[in-house]
C-alpha cells in the first residue's frame, strides 16, 4: 500500500508523463515510416538494393561516396523513404530535452535552485549534442 | 523445461552467428578477389551524383536477408537480455558488430538507439512507481551525458580495428565484472556525504517484498560522479548501454538500494544515450535499415523474456549470457587484431 511519502514527486510525474506519450508516439511513427521506406512508396536517397555496398564502409567514407548529409542536412531530404525515418529517430532522441524543459518551471516554482541549474545545464549539453555543431575529424 | 529451452535458444543463436560470420567473411573475400571496383552510382532523386567508392566490398547476399537476420537475432537477444539481467545494448554491439557485415560505426549508432528506446520505454513506469529517482539520476546524468558526447566523438574518430580491439577488451572486462560482482539489496550508508545532503539525494519507496517503506540515502557522491565520467565516455565510444557499470556504482559505491539502483540506471540510460545518439545521428552513422529491425526485434524479445522470466532459473541463464558475451567479446578482440577477420 503506497502512501504520500512513497509517492513520486510532482516533477518526476511530469517527466514520466511526457516521456510516456513521446516514447510511444515516436516508436509508432518509426514503424510506420520504416514500412513506407521498404515498401518503396517514396523514392530513396540510397537505393535499397545498393545498401549492402555501402553499409560496410566507415561513416566518413559512406558520406563522401554518397554525398550524404551530416548534421541537420537530413531535414530537407525527408521526402526520401530512408530519411523519412529520421523524423521519429529525432523525436525519440529529442524527447529527453523536452522532458527537462517541462520540469524546469516546476523546479523553479519549488525554489529547488540546484536542480533547476542542473536541468538547465542538461538542456544545454543535450542541445549542443543535437545542434550538429560538434564535428568529428575525417579519417 | 524453460531452462532447457533457454539452452536451445542460445545454441541456435550461436549456430546462426557462426553462419553469419562465415557468410560475411566469404562474401568479403569474394569481393576483394573480384575486383577493387568502384561501386556504381546509386540513382537517387535530387542528390548529386556520388563519388567513386573506394573498393567497397559487395556482398552477393540479397539485401533483405540482413534486416531479417537482424530482427531474428535481436529478438533472441531481447529474450536473453531480460533473462540474463543485462541491457540489450551490451549484447547488441559486440554480437552484431562481430557477426554482421555492417561497419562498426553504424552498429554503434544502432546500439545506442536500441539502448535508448529500451530506456525510454521503461522510464515512465519506473519514475511513476518512484523506483527510478530523478534526484539521484539528474546530477549523475549531467556528468555522464557530457562525457558520452566526448566518448562518441573519440569513438567515431578511431579506426575500426582499434574500436573492435578496445570493444573486445571492454566486453571481456564486463564478463569479469558480471562474474564476480556482488549486489546488495539494502547497502548500509553510515553517513550521507555533504554533496548528497546539499542536493537532497534521498528517498523513500515501498518495498513490496517486505511489505514496508524503505528510506534510502547515498554516500561517496563525488567519487561516484568521477566514475560516471568514465562510464559516459565508454557508453559513447562503444555505443553500449552502460547498465553493467551504472548499477555497481549506484548500488555498491553510493549505497542506493538495489531496486533503486537498477531502476535509476535504466532511466539514466535514456539521458546518457541521448547525447551520444545525437553525435552519431549528426555524423550520419544511423542507418534505418539497421536501427528499426534491431529496435523492434529487441523490444519484442524483451516482452517475451519478461513472460519467460517468471518460470526461469535466472542464475543458470546469467551464466549462459556470460558465456555468450565471452564469445562475442573474443570475436570482437580477434576481429580487431585481424586474427578472425
Image (cartoon, coloured by chain):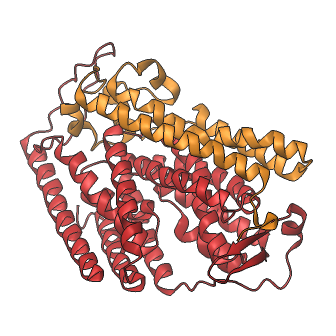
Chain colours: A orange, B red
Seen at 28% across and 27% down, the residue is A46
Query: Residue B161's image quarter?
Result: bottom left
- Residue B14 or residue A128, whichever sits in front: B14
Seen at 36% across and 69% down, the residue is B80
Q: Is residue B75 visible?
A: yes
Relative to B61, is B38 above or below? above
**How many numbered callouts?**
0
In this rendering, position of residue B98 left or right of residue B242: left
Seen at 18% across and 40% down, the residue is B63
- Residue B25 or residue B141, whichever sits in front: B141
Relative to B339, is A84 above or below? above
Relative to A66, is B336 above or below? below
Give residue B21's position: percent from left, percent from top. Answer: 19, 60
Query: Residue A68's image quarter?
Result: top left
- Residue A22 or residue B330, whichever sits in front: A22
Seen at 42% across and 67% down, the residue is B306
Question: Which residue in the rendered view is the most extreme toward the front?
Answer: A1
Give residue A105's position: percent from left, percent from top. Answer: 82, 39
Q: Is residue B100 visible?
A: no
Quadrant of the image for the N terminus of chain B?
A: bottom left
Give residue A106's position: percent from left, percent from top. Answer: 82, 43
Query: Residue A8's image quarter?
Result: bottom right
In this rendering, position of residue B218 left or right of residue B115: right
Give residue B234's position: percent from left, percent from top. Answer: 54, 60
Amino acid at each position: 500500500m503506497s502512501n504520500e511519502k512513497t509517492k513520486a514527486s510532482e516533477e518526476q510525474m511530469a517527466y514520466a508523463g511526457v516521456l510516456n506519450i513521446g516514447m510511444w508516439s515516436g516508436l509508432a511513427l518509426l514503424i510506420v515510416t520504416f514500412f513506407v521506406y521498404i515498401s518503396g512508396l517514396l523514392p530513396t536517397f540510397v537505393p535499397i538494393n545498393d545498401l549492402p555496398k555501402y553499409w560496410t564502409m566507415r561513416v566518413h567514407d559512406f558520406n563522401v561516396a554518397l554525398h550524404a548529409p551530416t548534421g541537420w542536412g537530413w531535414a530537407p531530404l525527408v521526402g526520401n523513404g530512408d530519411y523519412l525515418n529520421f523524423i521519429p529517430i529525432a523525436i525519440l532522441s529529442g524527447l529527453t530535452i523536452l522532458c527537462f524543459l517541462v520540469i524546469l518551471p516546476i523546479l523553479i516554482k519549488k525554489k529547488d535552485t540546484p536542480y533547476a541549474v542542473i536541468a538547465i545545464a542538461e538542456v544545454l549539453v543535450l542541445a549542443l549534442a543535437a545542434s550538429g555543431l560538434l564535428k568529428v575529424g575525417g579519417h | 523445461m524453460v531452462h532447457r529451452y533457454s539452452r536451445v535458444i542460445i545454441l541456435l543463436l550461436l549456430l546462426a552467428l557462426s553462419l553469419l560470420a562465415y557468410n560475411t567473411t566469404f562474401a568479403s573475400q569474394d569481393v576483394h578477389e573480384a575486383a577493387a571496383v568502384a561501386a556504381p552510382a546509386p540513382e537517387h532523386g535530387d542528390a548529386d551524383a556520388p563519388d567513386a567508392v573506394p573498393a567497397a566490398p559487395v556482398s552477393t547476399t540479397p539485401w533483405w536477408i540482413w534486416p531479417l537476420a537482424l530482427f531474428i537475432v535481436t529478438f533472441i537477444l531481447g529474450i536473453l537480455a531480460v533473462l540474463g539481467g543485462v541491457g540489450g545494448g551490451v549484447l547488441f554491439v559486440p554480437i552484431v558488430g562481430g557477426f554482421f557485415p555492417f561497419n562498426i560505426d553504424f552498429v554503434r549508432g544502432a546500439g545506442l538507439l536500441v539502448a535508448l528506446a529500451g530506456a525510454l520505454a521503461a522510464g515512465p513506469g519506473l519514475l511513476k512507481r518512484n523506483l527510478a529517482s530523478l534526484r539521484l539520476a539528474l546530477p549523475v546524468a549531467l556528468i555522464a551525458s557530457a562525457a558520452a558526447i566526448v566518448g562518441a566523438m573519440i569513438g567515431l574518430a578511431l579506426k575500426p580495428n582499434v574500436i573492435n580491439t578496445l570493444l573486445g577488451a571492454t566486453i571481456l572486462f564486463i564478463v569479469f565484472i558480471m562474474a564476480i560482482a556482488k549486489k546488495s539489496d539494502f547497502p548500509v550508508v553510515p553517513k550521507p556525504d555533504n554533496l548528497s545532503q546539499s542536493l537532497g539525494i534521498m528517498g523513500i519507496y515501498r518495498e513490496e517484498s517486505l511489505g514496508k517503506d524503505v528510506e534510502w540515502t547515498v554516500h561517496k557522491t563525488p567519487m561516484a560522479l568521477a566514475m560516471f565520467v568514465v562510464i559516459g565516455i565508454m557508453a559513447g565510444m562503444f555505443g553500449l548501454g552502460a547498465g553493467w557499470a551504472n548499477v555497481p556504482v549506484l548500488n555498491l559505491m553510493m549505497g542506493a538500494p538495489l531496486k533503486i539502483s537498477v531502476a535509476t540506471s535504466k532511466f539514466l540510460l535514456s539521458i546518457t544515450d541521448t547525447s551520444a545518439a545525437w553525435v552519431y545521428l549528426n555524423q550520419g552513422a544511423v542507418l534505418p535499415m539497421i536501427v528499426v529491425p534491431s529496435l523492434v526485434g529487441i523490444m519484442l524479445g524483451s516482452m517475451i523474456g519478461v513472460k519467460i522470466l517468471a518460470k526461469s532459473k535466472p542464475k543458470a541463464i546469467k551464466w549462459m549470457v556470460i558465456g555468450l558475451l565471452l564469445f562475442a567479446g573474443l570475436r570482437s578482440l580477434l576481429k580487431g587484431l585481424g586474427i578472425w577477420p
